Amino acid sequence: MRLYYARPGRRSYRPVVDRLAVSMSGAVALVGFAVLTGALSLVGESHSVGFALGGFAVLGAVLGAVSRPVAAPLIAVAGWLFLNGFVVHRYASVEWGGTGTECARLGLLTAVALVASLPAALPRRRVRVQLLAVPARASDRRV
């Protein structure tokens, strides 16, 4: 038996998709942002903050799409740590660059992760679909 979800008032059905737990989202975010930081340094774009912030926002949205909405702040903090430590202030030194600047970066990363995770959190009703076995035809039976 497969379970499907349907939003109230719609006729389209979608299969049930499990989201990552909050702790697993944090672990995947740390690894993902570490890989992104390494990739940016290999490409040579680790010093341009605008390009790197865009890459971090895209990765935050991808991680938010597979996570629960509660994990959005954890994804944002993981992204901010790598962005601040390796792109903005280089050499793994996390420094505070001003309340407005840092809150804007944290807010952006939180917003993209939260907006990407919200469609999965909308209320849906569960629909059960049972797969019925097709009876064999009389001409196909061999006795």
Image (cartoon, helix red, strand yellow):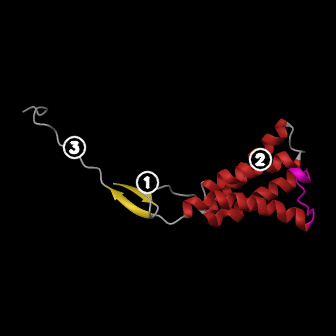
**Residue 70 against residue 12 in the figure, above or below:** below
Q: CA distance from mark 1 to mark 2?
A: 33 Å
Q: Tell me the quarter of the picture where residue 29 sits.
A: bottom right
| Earlier residue among tags 3 and 1 | 1
- Front position in the image: 14 or 141: 14
Q: Is residue 24 left or right of residue 112?
A: left
Location of residue 4 in the rendering, given as x and y in whole percent from the top left corner: 41, 56
Q: What span is in magenta? A: 87-98
For residue 36: magenta? no
- Residue drawn at (41%, 63%) of the image: 126
Location of mark 3 (residue): 134
| Earlier residue among tags 1 and 2 | 1
- Disc 3 or disc 1, which is closer to the eye? 1
- Residue drawn at (89%, 45%) of the image: 48
The label shown at residue 12 is 1
Q: Amino acid under label 3?
A: Val
Mark 1 falls on what kind of element?
A: loop
Location of residue 2 in the rendering, given as x and y in whole percent from the top left corner: 37, 54
The label shown at residue 71 is none
Main secondary structure found in the magenta portion:
loop
